[in-house]
Amino acid sequence: MPEIVTDIVINAPAAAVLDYATTPAHWPRFWPITLSVSGDVGSPAVVGARWIEQVKVSFWRGEFHWEAAERVQPTRFVMRGKSQGHGWVGRLLPSEPGSITYTLTETAGRTHFHRVMEYADANMLVKLMDVLFMRRAMRRAIDEALHALKDIMESGGATGTGSRP
């Protein structure tokens, strides 16, 4: 199963970072691929919470159906979901399961945020799309999102809502 691993250090307490990062209503503010969210989105996701994230990654447009699978405050969060594409690309690519795990370690008010995204590449078309386009596009989006999250948390903007600054 392919994975994308990313790390960043944020000058904010782990509990605040985890709460903000796991509140889906905040995602359009810092995730460049997130168009909108619906479902259990208004507070930090608890085990069993479900939501749908409308996304656009490169030329792929679709949605992720997420469920919070594990939460250990303030150090760990796991969500699992499936993709569902729209349009002709969505019809070509099957719905694929995946998971995202956040592991946070706080030292002296600074949080090391470790993110692992695992996803299936069940057939040759998905593997080819991953190698040629999707992995690079996702890595760019993840890097941009984590730096935006860092900026929000460190500037005190975590109390605001709305679109990306």
Image (cartoon, grey):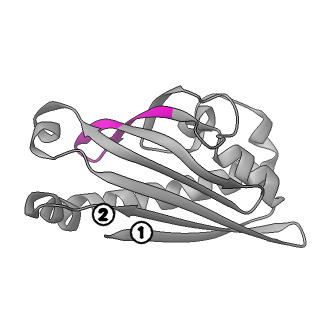
Mark linked to residue 4: 1
Locate residue 123, reporting x and y percent: 12, 61
x, y percent for residue 57 = 32, 46
Q: Please name the residue shown 60% across and 61% down the image.
A: 102
Residue lying farthest right?
108
Real-space Cα distance between discs 1 and 2? Answer: 8 Å
Crowd around label 1: few <14 · some 14–19 · many ≥20 (10 Å): some
Say whether residue 57 is magenta: yes
**Which mark is on residue 63?**
none
* Quadrant the C terminus occupies: top right
**Amino acid identity at mark 2:** Arg
Horizontal relation, residue 23 to residue 78: left or right: right
Q: Amino acid at mark 1?
A: Ile
Tell whether label 2 touches label 1 (CB within 8 Å). Answer: yes
**Which residue is found at the position 51% from the left and 56% from the top?**
144
User: Earlier along the polypeptide chain: callout 1 or callout 2?
Assistant: 1
Report the magenta residues as a range: 51-63
Query: Residue 13 sits in which quadrant?
Result: bottom right
Q: Is residue 155 above or below residue 41?
A: below
Q: Which residue is mark 2?
A: 135
Q: Viewer-proximal residue, 108 or 120?
A: 120
The percent coordinates of residue 150 (x first, y second) are 68, 57
Image quarter hosting the N terminus:
bottom left
Q: How many marks?
A: 2
